[in-house]
């Protein structure tokens, strides 16, 4: 963002003009969403505080009762110093007593320049805002939230709304930042779009615009093999997982889905879905010939497969074929403490879809303190594969550092079996030749959209049935 500022200023836009637009946007959001009431504007020493002085001035001009409290005077010669001199009222030192009759707080303490956990009176007032449950509007980010990671440094106010500028930052999408930001308003402050091309961002909010063109649309001359033949390697005991993978894969548009499992379980799979091809589980040494002979273009291994050597060897055999491969669930746990074995086996497009527990078993040194985006990027680089870390704020990262953050998943998706559905959708997209990064991004978006379409009371079985409609909409 600083680079965006710098480039915009280099393009002839004054830094103060950006600050004026930013502060004005904050005032506009406040006026649009709250009735006139006494407001306290907390200003830090940097440009975030500068935005605060501008917002305070606009609110006062609109007839609001405004008190400004500052942590310290902005450095002279800065845009923030100009904004402070243009504020016509007095500036009080930050003090908790100011909260008493001010039901609305604008938090312009720290933004992109947050350098350490807020302490002293800054920390005390953040804690007090939260204790009193006051309405708070964050400027750029809730102060204390790291915009790059969504992590909280020490403390941050729980905002009802946050007004940010130019583009959303990862911290608006990643937890806990996303929860603390409340509803996020994105304001255009006059930074030219061309600046984005110069910056070449490597992290995006997940959106169909990123991958829609790469979804494979059915063609007149298609037959079932040209639409992707996915092999699902499933288990003998937990058959629900494999059935959900297969059902989702079929609804996502695979031309054919075959499921391999121990012979005694095959009748269960066959009875569940007449259109599913069932096969006895091959020996690892026979897997390549099976996939080649049956023109299977991708493989999903892990859901319900069982943890252990058998699953591990099948996953390694699947990777050795060089075809697109997705490992989830038991296939990941089977490599706990042995992630280097998995990494060494990667030949072709490879996607893993761990949840938090599975991720931790594979990458115990990449703890939560690093922030999800950094954890997933590091894991992808280490594995030489695309990693989709599942959760309310799923992150997909490629070994080259590209990443997307997904924010369309409703909490209803926190339900058993939904991860298997995700694996099935991604498996089909891989089988259709979509690159692993885009396949993962598309799958997690479709999964979230399907979850939203069902809403309350959803069960994993509902999700595949939403896919035809969603795909139709994406193609139109
Ligand atoms: N294009 C835009 O998006 C625009 C953004 N604007 C706003 O500018 C801020 C970023 O401003 P910046 O001056 O770089 O940084 P901050 O204001 O966030 O913070 C820097 C100052 O705060 C001090 N600081 C940092 N952390 C702490 C802390 N925990 N406790 C006390 N003080 C802290 C820091 O002090 P140092 O000692 O570390 O130097 C700085 O004094 C962006 O977020 C937007 O709101 C512009 O308005 C223009 C357009
Ligand atoms: K802030």
Image (cartoon, rainbow, N blue to C red):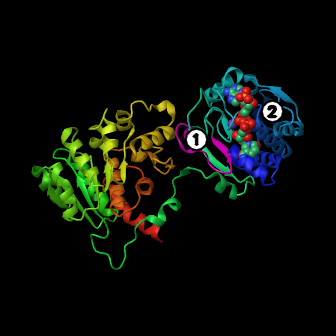
Q: Secondary structure at mark 2?
A: strand
**What range of the chain is rendered magenta?**
160-179
Residue placed farthest to the bottom in the image?
220
Is residue 146 inside the magenta stretch? Answer: no
Residue 429's quadrant in the figure? Answer: bottom left
Q: Residue 67: which disc? A: none
Q: Is residue 341 above or below residue 252?
A: above
Q: Which residue is mark 1?
A: 171
| Residue located at (24% from left, 51% from top) | 242
Kindly tell me whether residue 105 is visible in this rendering.
Answer: no
Q: Quadrant of the N terminus?
A: top right
Kindly tell me whether residue 32 is visible in this rendering.
Answer: yes
Q: Position of residue 105 (x, y in %)?
A: 71, 35
| Residue located at (55% from left, 39% from top) | 179
Q: Which residue is mark 2?
A: 68
Name the one closer to the observer, 347 or 163.
347
- Within 8 Å: ligand 1 and the Cβ of disc 1? no
């Amino acid at each position: 963002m600083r680079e965006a500022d710098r480039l915009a200023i280099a393009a002839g836009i004054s830094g103060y003009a950006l600050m004026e637009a930013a502060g004005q946007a904050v005032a506009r959001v406040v006026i649009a969403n709250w009735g006139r009431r006494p407001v306290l504007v907390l200003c830090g020493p940097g440009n975030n505080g500068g935005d605060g002085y501008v917002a305070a001035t606009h609110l006062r001009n609109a007839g609001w009762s405004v008190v400004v409290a500052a942590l310290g005077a902005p450095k002279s010669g800065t845009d923030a110093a100009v904004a402070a001199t243009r504020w016509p009222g007095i500036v009080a030192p930050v003090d908790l007593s100011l909260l008493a009759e001010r039901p609305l707080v604008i938090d312009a303490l720290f933004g992109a320049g947050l350098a350490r956990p807020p302490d002293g009176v800054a920390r005390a007032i953040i804690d007090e805002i939260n204790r009193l449950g006051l309405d708070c509007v964050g400027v750029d980010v809730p102060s204390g939230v790291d915009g790059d990671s969504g992590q909280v440094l020490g403390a941050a106010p729980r905002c009802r709304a946050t007004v940010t500028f130019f583009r959303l930052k990862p911290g608006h999408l990643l937890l806990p930042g996303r929860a603390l930001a409340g509803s996020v308003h994105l304001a255009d402050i006059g930074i030219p779009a061309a600046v984005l091309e110069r910056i070449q961002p490597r992290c995006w909010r997940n959106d169909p615009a990123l991958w829609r063109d790469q979804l494979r649309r059915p063609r007149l001359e298609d037959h079932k093999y040209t639409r992707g033949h996915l092999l699902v390697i499933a288990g003998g005991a937990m058959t629900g997982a494999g059935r959900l993978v297969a059902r989702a894969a079929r609804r996502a548009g695979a031309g054919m889905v075959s499921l391999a499992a121990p012979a005694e379980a095959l009748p269960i799979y066959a009875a569940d879905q007449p259109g599913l091809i069932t096969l006895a589980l091959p020996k690892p040494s026979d897997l390549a010939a099976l996939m080649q002979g049956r023109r299977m273009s991708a493989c999903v291994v892990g859901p319900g497969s069982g943890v252990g050597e058998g699953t591990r060897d099948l996953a390694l055999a699947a990777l050795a074929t060089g075809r697109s491969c997705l490992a989830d669930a038991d296939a990941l746990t089977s490599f706990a403490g042995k992630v280097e074995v998995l990494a060494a086996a990667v030949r072709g497009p490879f996607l893993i879809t761990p949840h938090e527990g599975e991720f931790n078993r594979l990458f115990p040194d990449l703890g939560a303190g690093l922030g999800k985006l950094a954890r997933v990027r590091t894991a992808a680089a280490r594995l030489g594969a695309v990693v989709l870390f599942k959760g309310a704020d799923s992150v997909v990262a490629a070994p080259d550092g590209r990443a997307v953050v997904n924010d369309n998943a409703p909490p209803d998706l926190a339900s058993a079996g939904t991860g298997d559905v995700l694996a099935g959708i991604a498996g089909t997209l891989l089988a259709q030749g979509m690159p692993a990064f885009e396949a993962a991004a598309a799958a997690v978006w479709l999964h979230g959209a399907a979850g939203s379409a069902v809403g309350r009371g959803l069960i994993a079985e509902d999700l595949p049935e939403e896919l035809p409609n969603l795909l139709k909409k994406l193609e139109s």
